[in-house]
Amino acid sequence: EKNTIQLRNGPRMPLIGLGTYKIQGNEVILETLKTALESGYRSIDTAAVYRNECDIGTSLKLVLPQLDLTREDIFITSKLAPKDQGQGKCREACLKSLSNLQTDYLDLYLIHWPGVQGIKPDDPRNCQLRLQSWQDLEHLHKEGKIRAIGVSNFEERHLHELLCHCEVKPDVLQIEHHPHLVQSQLLRFCTENSIHFQAYSSLGTSSENNQLLRDAEVVRIADYLGKSPAQVLLRWAIQQGIGVLPKSTNQEHIKENIDIFGFCINDKDMEALNNLSRGSHYCWDPHHIT
Ligand code: A2P
């Protein structure tokens, strides 16, 4: 079974990557990356706002040779902070991420958010600034410093605006997506426009009492398949060609989360999972989008 997908502008991207939001600290990052790479992960997702790029860069320098791997064997994603949107600022921020991560190129770089820090959501300057950021990304892409370019947390209207103005089309949309928040319309738009749809918060992270991992239907399907609820949630996504970025610092979880290529959820249960959708955002407040 294929566990990578071809992006339009760039390299192949693994369908599963290690999320690193809130993973902090030298030692923790070193151990987490080591376990992940040993378990077969080849993709790592970070962002300037996660404030862990330096530790990830240092850890990779140490761990890759230990595991007989090189920079080319892995796929690194980072993202532009909302405070750095705009012409020149975006370029500078991206170059800073490159130096923090101690690498000459990124495999994928995303505009983290449609809005700009410090500007009200309905202010037209947001649009200007994100289109300027995109032009910076197009240049960096042409220079080979970022192999693929994309966006995160964009809604359909933001994607539409971008597609109307860009020269290089976006490779990826990264957004919250799981059975409690099935974004069918947005997913269809991405498919139609050859934008790879990548999910974050597949496990429903910050939900109170982990409502998603404990959902009776998810647990029922997990029991039936002899898998864990986390594996069912991740499988549900990749079986539709949707990329996932589960994050964990727990060795067993890290291994379990990538062990999702050797089983199948049947059509009826895929449908049952789709029907759980209830518009629950567990990671961010959609009203803050602009
Ligand atoms: P831990 O680090 O203890 O594994 P998301 O990717 O949706 O943001 O979810 C991340 C959260 O889910 C983390 O709190 C992580 O905690 C937990 N988690 C990750 N993998 C699993 C798993 N296989 N089973 C249960 N919880 C998990």
Image: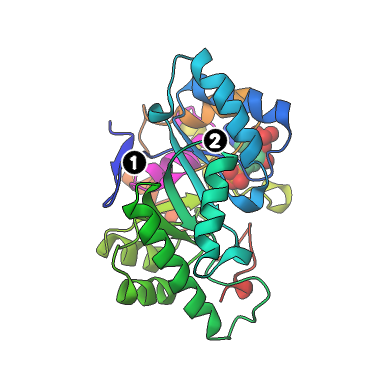
Q: Which residue is mark 1?
A: 266
Whether ligand 1 has any atom under 8 Å from the Cβ at mark 1 is answered as no
Residue 183: % across, % down: 44, 63
Is 247 placed left or right of 110 in the picture? right
Which residues lie in the magenta part?
225-244
Is 34 positioned to the left or the right of 149 in the image?
right
Q: Is residue 277 found inside the magenta-colored segment of the image? A: no
Which residue type does callout 1 highlight?
A: Asn
Please state if 47 lies on the left or on the right of 118 as rendered. left
Residue at horizontal 43%, vertical 28%? Answer: 71
Q: Nearer the viewer, residue 194 or 92?
A: 92
- Secondary element under disc 1, as helix, strand or loop, is loop
Front-lying residue, 135 or 234:
135
Report the quarter where the N terminus lies: top left
**Is residue 233 inside the magenta stretch?**
yes
Please state the horizontal and vertical placement of residue 188, each as a whole percent of the image.
32, 64
Q: Considering the numbered disc 2 on the image, is that residue within a helix, a strand or a loop?
A: loop
- Residue 35, image x and y in percent? 57, 22
The residue that disc 2 covers is 102
**Mark 2 lies within 8 Å of ligand 1 (Cβ measured):** no
Of badges 1 and 2, nearer the viewer stands 2
Write down the quadrant of residue 14 in the picture. Answer: top left
Tell me if residue 143 comes above or below residue 4 in the rendering: below
Can residue 277 be seen in this snapshot? no
Task: Say which residue appears at 32% left-offset and 54% top-offset.
Answer: 142
Q: Residue 178 at x, y = what percent?
A: 50, 53
Q: Is residue 174 above or below residue 19?
A: below
Instruction: Give the vertical position of 156 relative to 68 (above or below).
Output: below
The residue lying at 55 percent from left, 64 percent from top is 89
Q: CA distance from mark 1 to mark 2?
A: 43 Å
